[in-house]
């Protein structure tokens, strides 16, 4: 899929094992199949929005709708880039990055999910490293933020490996009980000190105005 009016469809991030891109309809169908399967053990809920509580057919349909809604809502002042992750020719999950007033704040937020059969193989670290490279090296970000519940050991391990520092807490109600979410922040110096995954970006220059930037990466 390509469009001269929407160059994001040609944006590609590549790591030694992964390919990340804005999904085609075929990719979305494959991602929906992953969403309909198991994302996490039923005894835990790692998401503030409890979307994985829905029946499989609703999770699959909601996955498509979430991507379509982000495409429609995109503005240079408020955007959400939701990429599919391909591993060994198979769609295995989704890596998102968003920005609000990015041209001024130079800050992005990331979030992701991965099908349970593909967890525990370092894919989560590699896919987040890919969008961090896009943020810092490609778009000129100064900060990247993320968050995870206090008991989400896998997400914490990825963040520690990539150099994030704790940045306070938020409290939510999940499954009818209070839970603590710990905020995490990575600055440019921390990212530069922990780069370990080679990342290649293709097709970025035509996309810069959609991120609120000119061709040089400046607002």
Image (cartoon, helix red, strand yellow):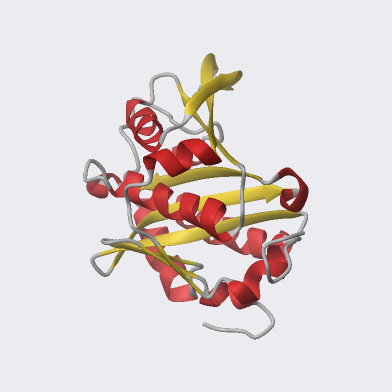
Residue 211 in the image: state x and y as whole percent: 69, 61
Q: Relative to 172, does residue 135 appear above or below in the rendering?
A: below
Image-based side of 118 in relation to 206, left or right: left
In this picture, residue 88 sits left or right of residue 40 = left
The residue at 42%/48% (across/down) is 128
Task: Please report the residue visible at 68 percent of the width from the left and 46 percent of the height from the top.
Answer: 106
Res. 159 in view: yes
> Does 106 sit above or below residue 89?
above
User: Residue 218's image quarter?
Assistant: bottom right
Q: In percent of the image, x 39 and y 20: which residue is there? A: 151
Q: Position of residue 75 (x, y in %)?
A: 76, 60
Q: Nearer the viewer, residue 31 or 181?
A: 181
Label total for image: 0
Q: Position of residue 153 (x, y in %)?
A: 33, 25
Res 54 seen here: no
Q: Is residue 207 above or below residue 131?
A: below
**Depth check, front residue: 207 or 51:** 207
């Amino acid at each position: 899929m390509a469009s001269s009016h929407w160059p994001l469809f040609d944006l590609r991030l590549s790591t030694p094992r992964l390919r990340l891109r804005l999904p085609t309809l075929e990719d979305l169908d494959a991602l929906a199949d992953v969403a309909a399967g198991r994302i996490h053990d039923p005894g835990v809920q790692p998401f503030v929005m409890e979307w994985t509580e829905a029946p499989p057919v609703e999770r699959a349909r909601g996955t498509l709708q979430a991507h379509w809604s982000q495409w429609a809502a995109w503005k240079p002042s408020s955007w959400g880039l939701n990429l599919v992750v391909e591993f060994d020719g198979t769609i295995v999950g989704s890596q998102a990055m968003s920005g609000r007033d990015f041209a001024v704040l130079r800050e992005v937020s990331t979030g992701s999910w991965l099908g349970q059969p593909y967890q525990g193989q370092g894919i989560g670290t590699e896919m987040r490293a890919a969008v961090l490279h896009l943020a810092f090296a490609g778009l000129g970000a100064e900060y990247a933020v993320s968050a995870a519940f206090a008991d989400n050991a896998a997400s914490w391990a990825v963040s520690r490996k990539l150099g994030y520092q704790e940045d306070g807490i938020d409290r939510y109600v999940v499954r009818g009980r209070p839970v603590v979410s710990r905020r995490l922040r990575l600055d440019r110096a921390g990212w530069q000190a922990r780069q370990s995954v080679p990342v290649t970006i293709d097709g970025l220059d035509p996309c810069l105005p959609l991120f609120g930037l000119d061709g040089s990466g400046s607002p």
